Image: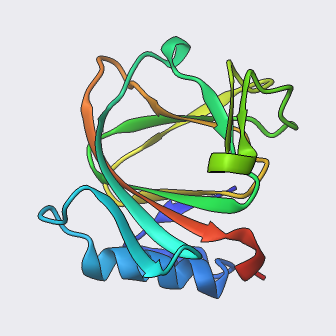
Amino acid sequence: MITGNIHHLDLVPYLPAKLRAAIEYVKQHITAETPLGKHEIEGNQVFVLVSNDSTEPQEKRRAEYHAKYLDIQIILNGVEGMTFSNLPAGKPDTDWLAEKDIAFLAAGDQEKQFVMHNGDFVVYYPGEVHKPLCAVGAPAHVRKAVVKIEAALVR
């Protein structure tokens, strides 16, 4: 997991070049007017999903992880609680890794949480358990971009 702010990439000099390029793409091409949905950067190897969502109380959210793609979750507008676990995933209650590259479980072990604001990003590598869209106080709207990158492309 790597965290930072898209406007201060100088503070994460260890960020792999492929991830830095994807964040720069979002900075330059994703605006408030960008339509919701999938936008290809490099076909199905690198793409961004733009969404308008609502946060929910943490206990209503399910944890997830991926196998093929890593996530760069970027807050475009709003505030979002992000829960994560540093421990291996337990047995998922829904395993769609082969079909959709996502598995769900109720929660990660020893979950921790941090708050993301406009411009903040977090990178989750395959296998890293995370629970996005957790409310910080009352549920609220959040606009975000999630860049999906085939993990094999990141060295």
Q: Which residue is drawn at 32% across and 76% down?
A: 27
Residue 76: x and y in percent read 29, 56
Depth check, front residue: 99 or 89 = 99
- Image height of 1 relative to 42, above or below: above
Position of 127 with respect to 19 (left or right) is right
Q: In this view, does 9 lie to the left or right of 78?
A: right
Question: In terms of image quadrants, where is residue 28?
Answer: bottom left
- Front residue of this view, candidates 66 and 19: 66
Say above or below: 53 vs 101. above
Please provide percent x and percent y for residue 22. Answer: 48, 78
Image coordinates of residue 4 in percent, x first then y, are 52, 62
x then y, percent, for residue 35: 19, 61
Side of 35 relative to 147 (left or right): left
Residue at (85%, 25%) from the top-left corner? 91
Which quadrant of the rendered structure holds the C terminus?
A: bottom right
Location of the N terminus (image quadrant): bottom right
Q: Quadrant of residue 46?
A: bottom right
* Residue furthest front in the image: 99
